[in-house]
Amino acid sequence: MLAAETNVTRLCHEKAVPAVNGEFPGPTIYARKGDVVVVNVYNQGHKNITIHWHGVDQPRNPWFDGPEYITQCPIAPGSNFTYRIIFSGEEGTIWWHAHSDFDRATVHGAIVVHPELGSSFPYPKPHKEIPIILGEWWNMDVEKLLEETKRTGGDFKISDANTINGQPGDLFPCSKDGTFRVSVEHGETYLLRVINAGLSNDMFFAVAGHTLTVVGTDGHYLKPFTTGHVMISSGQTMDLLLHAINGSASRYYMAARTFQTNTELTVNNTTATAILEYTDAPPLTAGSPELPVLPAVDDLAAATAYTAALRSLATVDVPTHVDEHMVVTISVNVLPCKPSNGDTSSCEGPINGTWFAASLNNVSFVASPTGVDILDAYYHSIHGVYTSDFPSRPPVAFNFTEPEPGTELWFTERGMILRVQQLTRKEGQAVLVLRGKSSPPTTAADPLRASREREKIIEGRGMLAWERKGAASSGGRLQDRSFADVVFFDGAGLCAAGSFIGSNEAPSSCDKVYLFGLLTCFMVGSYTALA
């Protein structure tokens, strides 16, 4: 991979963007389950960069995971770094992206993991596989967007357009010629490998005149079900079968639009489009293709009904004994605004003189000023990079879903606080994490990402099937819970996620790397090292 700036024109604006191999989106990586792939990344750009292999477990291989200053120091301009990627259990669609600043906006691409030799898909082999990458486009330089956000402490400027495979579609000016097109034949079945690479936007996606059969998510198979639309969170992937049975038209729009539950927030409400064309249909007629009917931007019922239908195809080995319970509240908070020049008039937090922040259990993560990555500090016992006392409970108990809590609950504190988990049993430990979305100062739907430590989603949004003593409840409800790298929360959501950390006897697992501090890591110590 060659990372460098390349000139791109969208919405009548040309600008230089970071990209890999001159492509936006970047190249697709193909592998089989069980493969080990070696990727050498050369940085010929003007700033640091790292690459993260999103959805890859990387068992006992954390050094090549990619989060900047978490598992590695960034690749400096003029340098290179060789990644070793172990595809141990993934099968389906995952993806890669930059894990430094906002570079992910244009530095990303698909990873397609086919079944190992001698195996096959658990559904009829599709006629063709088509990567569909949803994203966002800013006319302004994304690096300047980051600088402005850091300077003001406000939320970052919304994107100017959503995109499909890097293109906003022909509903936008200067975009007709570049609109992504898919050619299909009547009677054939196509596998759409859909990835939401947007920085922040969850999205609804549909194809006019067609239904979609959902067969996988985040590199694992699902019990197939048919739907008219999907809701895909930022960072998530979906495997969708499309049966090409054309109706009265020969061209249909694929469309993607933002999903956001808080109507008080300014959102990118644009619709990105691509065009599905039948090659064996009568000559194309004049006029625009047919548009699909997408749910409303704030249609929470449609989103939750869709996510509730995601069920694992294979029986899930959910631990029946829980070694440790954690309750983690996810919050958007504020911090006192302290600009270097002392002028607080530029501060754009929700309260005068504040910056936006985000926290887990009221800890807003801040990277160490030492420039040492966390993994290096862990292995070499370097002090001052982090502390290991991340709390198992929020420090203050209140009604976490209260729409209008007192402003005294909005404030958080900075910290470099992680969770160090030493294995006490050779076969590992099961950690049940109850994650709740607390409300101050905004209430909106959000995705939460898990890096390297794939989670089993036990129950979602309040339907908890676990007893306080640590044993799983009886019954079959736990047996088909889906694996996930991304967990969707509504504005006052709750989710139980079980992590079996014995399979990764090395640090570390990151919850969500985000500008405002929504991050923590599990540092997993080896049982054998302690024996």
Image (cartoon, grey):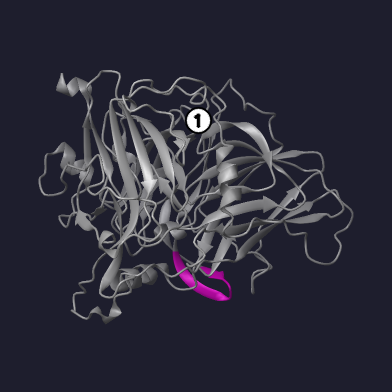
User: Looking at the image, can residue 405 be seen?
Assistant: yes
Q: Taking 162 as reference, is 86 above or below it?
A: above
Question: In this figure, which residue is indicated by the disc labeled 1?
Answer: 481
**Extreme residue toward the right, this view:** 282
- Between 324 and 282, the one lying in front of the other is 324
Q: Position of residue 508 (x, y in %)?
A: 28, 38
Name the image quarter holding residue 500: top left
Q: Position of residue 373 (x, y in %)?
A: 22, 48
What crowding class fits label 1: few (fewer than 14 Cα within 10 Å), some (14-19), or many (20 or more)? many
Q: Is residue 14 part of the magenta span, yes or no?
A: yes
In the displayed structure image, the side of residue 246 where residue 202 appears, left or right: left
Kind of residue sitting beneath label 1 = Arg
Identify the residue at image location x=67%, y=58%. Answer: 274
Identify the residue at image location x=50%, y=20%. Answer: 475
- Between 325 and 214, the one lying in front of the other is 325
Magenta region, main secondary structure: strand
Q: Taking 461 as reference, is 438 above or below it?
A: below
In the displayed structure image, the side of residue 182 where residue 343 appears, left or right: left
Q: Position of residue 442 (x, y in %)?
A: 40, 61
Count the marks. 1
Q: Taking 232 as reference, is 455 above or below it?
A: above
- Between 450 and 118, the one lying in front of the other is 450
Identify the residue at image location x=56%, y=52%. Answer: 300
Q: Taking 298 as reference, is 398 above or below it?
A: above
Q: Is residue 448 part of the magenta span, yes or no?
A: no
User: Looking at the image, can residue 513 be seen?
Assistant: no
Question: Which stretch appears magenta?
Answer: 8-17
Asked which secondary structure carries label 1, the reply is loop
Q: Position of residue 257 (x, y in %)?
A: 60, 59
Quarter of the image containing the C terminus?
Answer: top left
